[in-house]
Structures are given as structure tokens and as C-alpha cells.
Image (cartoon, coloured by chain):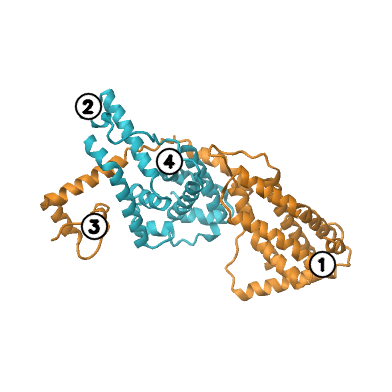
Chain colours: A orange, B cyan
């Protein structure tokens, strides 16, 4: 048998099968017989043993409880939405249904509905899977869902824009939580934007498009940002006036004042 | 009877936060070890653990059960660690940086735990950490998962989101770099 090369030796050390030309048993036999390969293997093992010198700091038995203490509130507060794996035609149907309701809600929203009651916030999923035959109820449900979506988007952006940043030792701010919330909002936003476009609500669609771009940029950016990146994001939010636009749109959706939106 | 991870996941999906808490209690220690080996820093590792559990909870709907929950969680933690290591602009805090392989202390004969020997051990540790920091994020991940977590290359590939062949070559490159950096040291310490 020919000598083992470094890669075969590594595979043998880790008990991976390696290639068929050097079955495990052959490799073992060769390492026992060949002094040269045996010495090289001993050297490999000594290096890998040395790597073990990096001790991991012990976490006490209380560590799991400490982890839970830090994340438990977020877990409880997270509104986890289980998106069904629907066929594309279902999404199309849902979009069309949402669009139809948006038409009713934004365009033909002359009916002056009273201010929405303090109902539990509805998830988009609930909205889409429970498109009611009753158009009046549907409009109210949709308006609440859109207002809820805008409110949650606004909260994410406000937290980033106005928070008192706590940078870590490497000078970065962890925005993973905001990022994940932004990610969850993108799909909803896309649906509402498409519906608004479908309904001919260009001003509404425009604001939602701006919002979507910001959400996407946050989602696809790094989870840890420097002070300069945070500053750039804040300046962008301010210069584009996106928070103000969302605020106005949200108020209008709740109060049903489509005319004001057209001025944005 | 202790519930399986799969059962706990189903309960957590149904809204039972206590079930997710049980998963946190079951996997925290191991996840911390992985994160520490990946990041080389206690605080970063703790952050990775917390972020990974939160991310896992928010994505429970994406867990399809093809891999075990532990593997899936490790994948999230490994990816978070890779992101963190890549985004880091400063080197790890624990690298000594200035010690040469030819440092006379490292070539002292090994005759027991003399102060010199203890110092040598400490420097070996520093050198190992330094060598680990020289690995790319993917190499480090692949090596940590294969060497410390004892995952098969196929599983390492799944965690990294690549094929087992790519994972294998990442491990090869990692070991090669470690050997180059540590072999003289390991010889002198024997």
C-alpha cells in the first residue's frame, strides 16, 4: 500500500470513510507498519491534541436558567405566525381578495366607519385565511391589519432611529431583534403594496414601497452595525421622511381619510 | 418520561412557551461551547446563544424535522457565529500576538508542572487561540463542528449549507493551517 497523504490521514483520524482506494482497515494496517506514516500521524495527533488546550469557560448549572431569563420575555412576546405552505394560486387568490378589500377600503371608503375597537391585533395569516364574505367586516379587518402592520413597522424604525444605542466592545450595535422583526414585516408589506397598486392607490403603494426598501435593507444588512452605519440609517430615515409618512398613512388608514394620503 | 425534542418543538409551535424553555435548558450548555469555540469570546458566545434561541423560536415554522432540532439549532448558532466573526473589525481579545514559536520558554524540557512549564502551557494555549483566529470563518466552523462537536462531514456540510465535499476541504484547510502554526510548538511541548 502506498503512503497515506495528509488528507487521507485526517479522514482516518476522524473516522470518515475516505476514498475507496484506501479502506479504513488498510489505512490502520499501514500506519502500524510504516514508520514514516506513523511519525507523520503522531505529529498530526499532537497538533490536534494541542488544539484541545483551548478550554471553554465552564457555565454553571444555572446557565440555562440565565439564558431563559434573558430571552424568555422576548419569546413570550413574540407573535409567532405560522405561515402555511400554500400553493401559489392560493397566494394569488389571497392577494386578489386583499386587493378587492383594499379597493373597498381605500377607494370606496366613503362609508365613514367609526374608529376601530380595541380588538386583538390580527396577523396577516388570520386576515388572509379568514377573508369574510361580509364586505363591511372585511374592510374593518383589513384596515386593522394594515394599521397594525404600519404600527409595527413604525416601532421597528423608531427603535432604530431613537434608541440609546448600547455598543459592544468592538463598537457595534446588535440589531438582530429589529432585523428579524423587519424581515417578518417584509412579506406583509409586499402584499399590501401590491394590493394598493392593484387598487390604483399609488400614493399608498408609494409609501409602502419606500417602507419595503428600508425594511429590506435592514433585513439584508449585517446584524451588528457600527455607530457610523447606525448614523447613516438614521439620516436616511430622516431625509426620506419615512417615519412621518408611515405615521400619516397609519392615521389615515385608521380614520379612513384617503384624500390626505394623496398629498404625500 | 422525558419528552423528545420533536415533541417539545410541536408543543412550542402550539404556543407552549414552557416547551421552548425546556429546549433552551436542554441545549444551552452545548450551544455555548460551540459558540465559544467559534467566536473565542465569552460575551460574544453568550450573545450568540441568546440570539440563536430567539431566532430558532421565531423560525420554528421553518423547522421541518429532516435534521434533529439540535443540528438545526447548531446550524443557526454556527451561522450567527460566522456573521459575528465576519463583522468583527477587531481581533479576538485573547490572542497574545507577540509570542514567537522560538520563544525559549517553549523549548524548556518537560519535567513536571514547574512555573516555567505552566507558563509554557499558557503560551501554547495562546498560540492555539491565535492559530484558530487565523482560520477563515468557514474553516473555523467546519473544524469546530468536526473536531469538537464530532459531527460527520455530511452533517457539517448541512450546517454550513454546502456539500460534504466542500465541508471536507474546509476541514483539510483548517487542519493544514493549524499544523503549520502549531507543529513546532507541539513537538517542543512533548
Q: Is residue A263 left or right of residue B128?
A: right
Q: Which residue is mark 3?
A: A8
* Residue neighbourhood size for the residue with mark 4, other residues' Cα within 10 Å, grouped as few (<14), some (14–19), many (≥20): many
Residue B112, which numbered label?
A: 2
Q: Are marks 1 and 3 on the same chain?
A: yes
Label 4 is found on which chain of the structure? B
Look at the image and tell me in which quarter the C terminus of chain A lies. Answer: bottom right
Q: Are marks 1 and 4 on the same chain?
A: no
Label 1 is found on which chain of the structure? A
Instruction: Tell me the distance, in whole angstroms, between the alpha carbons under discs 2 and 3.
Output: 35 Å
Q: Earlier in the sequence, mark 2 or mark 4?
A: 4
Q: Position of residue B12 (x, y in %)?
A: 55, 53
Instruction: Tell me the distance, in whole angstroms, between the alpha carbons under discs 3 and 4.
Output: 29 Å
Cβ atoms under marks 2 and 1 closer than 8 Å: no
Instruction: Tell me the distance, in whole angstroms, between the alpha carbons under discs 1 and 4.
Output: 54 Å
Give the answer, above or below, for where A230 lies relative to A183: above
Instruction: Tell me the distance, in whole angstroms, between the alpha carbons under discs 2 and 1.
Output: 82 Å
Q: Say what secondary structure mark 1 lies in.
A: helix
* Residue neighbourhood size for the residue with mark 2, other residues' Cα within 10 Å, grouped as few (<14), some (14–19), many (≥20): few
Question: Viewer-nearest of labels 1 and 3?
Answer: 3
Give the answer, above or below, for where A62 lies relative to A78: above
Q: Position of residue A91 (x, y in %)?
A: 64, 72
Label 3 is found on which chain of the structure? A
Q: Say what secondary structure mark 3 lies in.
A: helix
In the foreground, A69 or A13: A13
- The answer to whether residue A80 shows anywhere in this view is no
Cβ atoms under marks 1 and 3 closer than 8 Å: no
Rendered image quadrant of residue A99: bottom right
Residue A106, which numbered label?
A: 1
Amino acid at each position: 500500500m502506498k503512503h497515506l497523504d495528509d488528507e487521507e490521514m485526517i479522514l482516518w483520524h476522524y473516522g470518515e470513510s475516505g476514498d475507496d482506494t484506501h479502506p479504513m482497515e488498510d489505512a490502520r494496517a499501514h500506519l502500524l507498519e510504516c514508520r514514516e506514516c506513523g511519525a507523520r500521524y503522531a505529529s498530526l495527533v499532537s497538533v490536534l491534541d494541542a488544539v484541545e488546550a483551548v478550554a471553554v469557560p465552564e457555565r454553571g448549572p444555572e446557565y440555562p436558567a440565565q439564558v431563559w431569563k434573558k430571552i424568555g420575555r422576548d419569546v413570550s412576546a413574540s407573535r409567532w405566525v405560522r405561515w402555511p405552505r400554500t400553493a401559489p394560486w392560493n397566494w394569488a387568490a389571497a392577494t386578489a381578495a386583499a386587493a378587492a378589500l383594499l379597493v373597498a377600503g381605500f377607494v370606496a371608503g366613503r362609508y365613514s366607519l367609526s374608529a376601530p375597537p380595541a380588538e386583538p391585533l390580527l396577523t396577516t395569516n388570520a386576515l388572509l385565511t379568514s377573508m369574510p364574505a361580509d364586505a363591511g367586516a372585511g374592510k374593518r379587518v383589513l384596515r386593522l391589519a394594515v394599521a397594525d402592520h404600519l404600527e409595527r413597522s413604525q416601532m421597528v424604525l423608531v427603535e432604530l432611529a431613537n434608541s440609546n444605542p448600547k455598543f459592544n466592545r468592538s463598537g457595534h450595535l446588535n440589531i438582530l431583534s429589529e432585523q428579524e422583526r423587519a424581515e417578518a414585516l417584509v412579506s406583509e408589506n409586499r402584499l399590501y403594496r401590491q394590493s394598493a397598486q392593484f387598487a390604483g392607490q399609488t400614493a399608498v403603494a408609494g409609501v409602502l414601497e419606500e417602507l419595503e426598501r428600508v425594511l429590506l435593507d435592514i433585513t439584508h444588512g449585517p446584524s451588528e452595525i457600527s455607530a457610523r452605519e447606525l448614523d447613516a440609517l438614521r439620516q436616511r430615515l430622516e431625509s426620506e421622511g419615512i417615519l412621518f409618512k408611515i405615521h400619516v398613512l397609519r392615521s389615515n388608514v385608521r380614520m379612513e381619510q384617503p384624500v390626505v394620503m394623496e398629498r404625500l | 418520561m422525558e419528552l423528545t425534542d420533536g415533541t417539545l418543538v410541536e408543543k412550542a409551535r402550539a404556543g407552549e412557551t414552557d416547551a421552548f424553555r425546556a429546549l433552551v435548558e436542554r441545549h444551552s450548555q452545548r450551544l455555548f461551547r460551540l459558540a465559544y469555540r467559534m467566536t473565542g469570546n465569552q460575551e460574544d458566545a453568550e450573545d450568540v446563544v441568546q440570539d440563536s434561541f430567539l431566532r430558532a423560536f421565531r423560525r420554528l415554522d421553518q423547522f421541518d424535522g429532516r435534521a434533529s432540532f439540535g443540528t438545526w439549532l447548531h446550524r443557526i448558532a454556527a451561522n450567527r457565529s460566522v456573521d459575528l466573526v465576519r463583522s468583527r473589525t477587531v481581533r479576538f481579545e485573547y490572542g497574545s500576538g507577540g509570542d514567537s514559536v522560538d520563544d525559549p520558554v517553549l523549548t524548556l524540557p518537560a519535567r513536571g508542572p514547574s512555573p516555567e512549564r505552566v507558563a509554557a502551557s499558557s503560551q501554547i494555549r495562546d498560540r492555539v487561540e491565535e492559530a484558530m483566529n487565523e482560520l477563515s470563518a468557514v474553516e473555523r466552523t467546519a473544524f469546530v463542528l468536526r473536531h469538537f462537536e464530532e459531527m460527520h462531514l455530511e452533517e457539517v456540510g448541512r450546517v454550513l449549507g454546502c456539500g460534504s465535499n466542500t465541508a471536507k476541504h474546509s476541514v483539510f484547510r483548517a487542519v493544514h493551517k493549524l499544523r503549520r502554526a502549531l507543529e513546532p510548538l507541539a513537538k517542543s511541548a512533548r
